[in-house]
Image: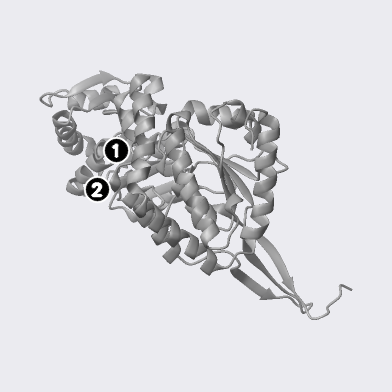
Amino acid sequence: MSTHDIPAYMAQLGQAARAAATAMARAGTRAKNDTLLALARLLREQTSALQTDNARDIAAAEAAGLAAPMVDRLRLTPKVIATVAEGCEQLAAMPDPIGEITGVKRRPTGISVGQMRVPLGVFGMIYESRPNVTIEAASLAIKSGNACILRGGSEAIHSNLALWKLVQQALTEAGLPATAVQLVETTDRAAVGRLIAMPEYVDVIIPRGGKGLIERISAEAKVPVIKHLDGNCHTYVDAEVDIAQALVVTDNAKTQKYSPCNATESLLVHAQSAVAFLPRIGAIFAAKGVEMRCDPAAKAILSDVPGARLADATEADWSTEYLAPIISVKVVASVDEAIAHINRYSSHHTDAILTTNHPNAMRFLREVDSASVMVNASTRFADGFEYGLGAEIGISTDKFHARGPVGLEGLTSLKWIVLGQGEVRS
């Protein structure tokens, strides 16, 4: 298939995906699981060959002067390959959601009405850097009975091609269409423009990468997009709180890893807890080199902490996703003020309350308008694997169609079914 004529090439991929989606929708659980187990086996068997292809991408990235963290994201180490292979096996062991019928109720007319879970059809996945996403997306597509068109970053083209060939081999072994998972084989950016503008072939687009990529896809797509732009997550320490527990959770939420979208970027502390809590968490942050951008009340309390890196918070700080050892800190007068602040400045990804006051916890859960809302837990738990979803294809901060971590069920929809015995409407 020639990649020179981009519109014709993408139309071919779309037509093949649409045909494959029909076959995948009727595929049995055993065939899908056999594909996943075969893929896990092939990944382990071909680890050395995969690393050879990956080395070409690594060398090109280093020669192009790509930053070290970006180069690290490209690496297909034996551990990374083993992890994605294990992920395939875990998906195979999970229940198959497709065809599940729920909520059946008998109506007075005699008909029975319920809902059946079905695949979305065809999804397009556009992602950067990490080649392991190729396997994660492919495996989720297979288990959920969808077809997919994958477009990875140009910096990982050789790795992605090698991984995709293993996916196709596994599909063929299990008797499923190899075109159920297709990879865009050109690095021409025009292919992305076509992929996100083919509603006749593609049912949903899932971008996974930096804010610039996701903003572009959201602005230009002519099909629905499952996305999140920012991860400005909050931890709120209430007036009634277990201080020792709050210190451990807040530290983990911010410093366990700085780069993920579920790391806490803003810390709110009730005025009644501030004097007891802030100097102690400030000392922990100071020891780890975390800069604290504070409102005047927080800065006054933290000013005596040895080695504390303090700065005055600006209006922009309250809505900034730092992805770095920086956190904004604000003292609030009430749970009402905390909720109002979060709903104004949050990116609606993940927000947590640390409290021993049950009514306040329940208010926070109901009133904070975010995809994940937590009580007495680190925001770092906002993850498909941690939620028991198996693999995760991304996080959605939208309210339709999926919200929060998107796993198998996020790649399905419900349709109404009616069961009758010859009933007619009078």
Q: Nearer the viewer, residue 219 or 337?
A: 219
**Residue 384 higher or lower than 211, as above or below:** below
Q: Which residue is located at x 26 percent, y 19 percent?
A: 311
Q: Amino acid at mark 2?
A: Val
Where is residue 92, by image quadrant? Answer: bottom left
Look at the numbered disc 1 and give the secondary structure of its residue.
strand
Which residue is at the front of the view, 119 or 261? Answer: 119
Q: Which mark is residue 270?
A: 1
Query: Can you say whether 390 is above or below 334 in the image?
Result: below
Residue 266 in view: no
Residue in the image at 60% along x and 56% along y: 177
Compare residues 241 and 137 and report the one nearer the observer. Answer: 137
Mark 2 highlights which residue?
Answer: 241
| Extreme-left residue of the structure | 306
Residue 2 x, y percent position in the rendering: 64, 33
Q: Quadrant of residue 246?
A: top left
| Residue 73 appearing in the image | yes
